[in-house]
Image: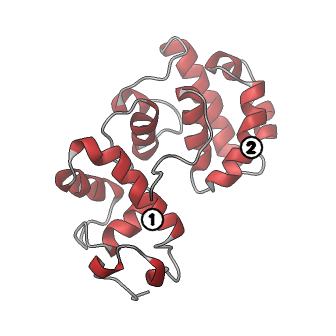
Amino acid sequence: MPVAESELHYRNPFELLVAVVLSAQCTDKRVNLVTPALFEAYPTPQAMAEATYTAILSYIQSVSYPNNKAKHLLGLAQKLHQDFNGQVPDSLELLQTLPGVGRKTANVVMAVAFNQPAMPVDTHVFRVSHRLGLVAKTANSPLQVEKELTKHIAKEEWAVAHHWLLLHGRYVCVARNPHCETCGIAAFCPSKNKK
């Protein structure tokens, strides 16, 4: 992947955080359709914190699990406004105190918004890491995969390696019928042509 970066559209750490929360079990393409109007209505944590659940929900109806995500967005905006002076924290631990923000989301924000060494593990990274034999078959949780990958990949490469794996999984090493015939690393893959 010559351009290994997030496919989510955002202009600042707050917008990235909101987009990543919305992207859980949803495509980046769908999120990118929803966020322009959402960000226009709520450009800051304070603006979103002053909104209502119903108002936020009206902007995100087409994403997966909109009810929960509207609650999370309202809660995280309120916490950012009240506890962090409207700033997205640049700490993995503090990010995970925000509603709707788990380890993967926090790692994405750390890597993408703050250019910090972080290895987010989503379903694509999880699948591709196993298929390529980068992690043990017994690594059966995202945290175990993250720990194995970070042990074997240079720290300064974590963020870009995440995008390499994610994009490879999204476009080449897809879940069903991977495109082994066009894969640039098929010669090194122990799972080549095994579905």
Query: Is 76 located above or below residue 124 in the figure?
Result: above
Query: Is 191 located above or below residue 151 in the figure?
Result: below
Q: Quadrant of residue 51?
A: top right
* Left or right of residue 181: residue 185: left
Q: Identify which residue is drawn at 53% across, 80% down.
A: 176
Q: How many marks?
A: 2
Local crowd size for mark 1, using a 10 Å CA cut-off: few (<14), some (14–19), many (≥20): some
Dot 1: what SS? helix
Q: Identify which residue is drawn at 39% across, 43% down.
A: 103
* Left or right of residue 74: residue 79: left
At which x and y percent is residue 194? 39, 88
Local crowd size for mark 2, using a 10 Å CA cut-off: few (<14), some (14–19), many (≥20): some
* Left or right of residue 65: residue 112: left
Q: Which mark is residue 168?
A: 1
Q: Is residue 159 visible?
A: yes
Q: Is residue 64 visible?
A: no
Tag 2: residue type? Val
Residue on which the image places disc 2: 34
Q: Quadrant of the C terminus?
A: bottom left
Of the image marks 2 and 1, the number of the one nearer the N terminus: 2
At which x and y percent is residue 93? 34, 31
Towards the viewer: 41 or 8: 8
